[in-house]
Amino acid sequence: MRNQKEATWSPLFKEAVSRDFESFHECLDQDKRIALHDVAGSKVHAQMLAGVGIITAEENADIQSGLDRIADEMRTGAFEWKTELEDVHTNVEDRLIALIGDAGKKLHTARSRNDQVATDIRLYAREQLDLLAGDLKTLIAAFVDLAEKHADAIMPGFTHLQVAQPVTFGHHLMAYAEMFLRDLDRVGAARERLNVSPLGAAALAGTGYPIDPEYSAAQLGFSGSFANSLDAVSDRDYVVDICSAGALVMGHLSRFSEEVILWCTPMFDFIEVGDQFCTGSSIMPQKRNPDLAELVRGKAARVIGNLTFSAALMKSQPLAFNKDQQESKPPLTDTLETVRAAVSVTAQMIPTIKVKHEKMLSAANQGYSTATDLADYLVRGGLPFRDAHHAVAAIVGAARDKQLATLSELSLADMQAFAATIREDVFKVLTVEGSVASRDHKGGTAPRRVREAVETVRQAIA
C-alpha cells in the first residue's frame, strides 16, 4: 500500500522517495511562516469555487469550517506538521481531508501548488512590508526627536572623514531621516508592485474551469489579478525587489552604526549609548562596546548577500515554474525578519544616546573648519571665488606653520598679508557658531532650518 506522500503524486511513481531526497526537498521550516496565509487563500479559493458552481454550498461550508479549525490549530501550536508531506499545502489538505472527508479533496480543483505558493508568499510579504513600514516610521520619529533636542549642538561635518565645515548634530541626524524616508517610499513601491494575485493561474496555463480570478484577488486584498498565467506562477521579481529595498535599509543602518561606533571611541567621544545596547569584555574590565551597532553593521552584509542570491537565482530559469524557486523563500524571509529586527532595535537605541556637546564643539573648532566661511567673506568683498580660495589656502598654511588650532588665532595683519580686503569684522565670520547660523536656507544646517525640517518630516510620517 502506498503511503500518503506517494499518493500525493499518483500511481505513476512505483518507488518511494529517497529519504535523503525527502529531507533535501521538504521546506516546512520556511512554509510555517506562510501557513496562515495558505489557509486564508484556500478559504477564498473554496468560496470562489462555490460561487461559480464548481462545488456545492454545503461542500464549501464544510471546507470553511475545516480550514477555520486548522487555522486555530496553527495558532495554538496543536497542528501536526508531517515532514513526509513536504510542504504547507499538502499538510493543510491532508488535515482537511481528515477533518471533513471527501469535500476536502475538492479544494484543490482549479488550482496548482504553483499559483498557491505564489499567492501565499505575496500575502506573507505584503503583511511583512506593512509591518516594516510601521517600523521605519518609528525609526524616523526617533531620529527626528533626537535631532530636535540637539538642533543647536555644533559638531564637525566631515568629508573623507576629515573635518570639513561645522554643522549641527540635529542636521546630521536629519540626513538619516531623509534616507529612511526614501526607504519607506521604496517599501511602499515594492508592496504596490507585488500586490497582484496569481491565484487561478494554476500550474502555468490557467484552468479549464470557469473561475473568477478577480473575485479571489479582491477577497484577498490584491489590487487585481494576473494578466498572464505563465508570468503569474514564475514571477519572483518581488522577492528581488524586497531584498533590494531591504539591502538599502540595512546599508543606511550600517552607515549610522559606523558613525555610532566612531563617536563612542575616546578619540571622538561625541556620544554615549545606553547600557541596554552595549556589552563589556571578558578580560578588559574598562571596555564598553556599542555591540548593537556592530551587529547591525554585520547583518547588513547578510541582507546584501540575500539580494545577490535572489537576483542570481532567477537569472537563467526558463518559463514557467521551476523547483529552484523554492530557494527564493529563505532570502525573502531572512531579509524581512532581519531588517525589521534591525530597524526596531536601532529605534530603541536612539533615545538612549547621550550627546556630549562640549566634545563636539571642541572638535568642530579643529581642522580650520571655518576656512570656507573666510573664502565666502572675501567673495562678498569683491574677490573672485577662485582667488579667494587660493588666498585662504595660504592663510591656512600660515596658521599651520604657527601651529595654531584655529584661524581666529591669527592676527588681522597676518591675514591681510594674503588678502588686503580683510577687516576687523572677519573674526565674527571665523566662529563655528557664525558659520552654522549663516547656512540659513532650506536644507541648511542652521538650527532654525533643522527645526523646520523636523516638522516637515513629522508631517510626512504622520
Image: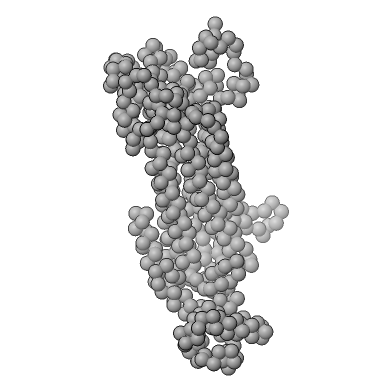
- Nearest the eye: 392 or 336: 392
Q: Quadrant of residue 260?
A: bottom right
* Residue at the right extreme, as displayed: 283
Look at the image and tell me in which quarter the N terminus lies. top right
- In the rendered image, residue 67, in percent from the top left (x then y), is placed at 38, 22
Query: From where the camera sits, is residue 363 visible?
Result: yes
- In the rendered image, residue 22, in percent from the top left (x then y), is placed at 59, 21
Q: Quadrant of residue 316?
A: top right
Q: Is residue 279 above or below residue 130?
A: below
- In the rendered image, residue 253, in percent from the top left (x then y), is placed at 52, 53
Look at the image and tell me in which quarter the C terminus lies. bottom left
Residue at 40% x, 22% y is 111
- In the rendered image, residue 25, in percent from the top left (x then y), is placed at 58, 24
Q: Is residue 390 above or below residue 153?
A: below
* Residue at the top extreme, as displayed: 1
Residue at 38% x, 38% y is 195
Q: Quadrant of residue 211?
A: top left
Q: Is residue 160 left or right of residue 39?
A: right
Residue at 47% x, 75% y is 436
Query: From where the camera sits, is residue 277 visible?
Result: no
- Nearest the eye: 228 or 50: 228
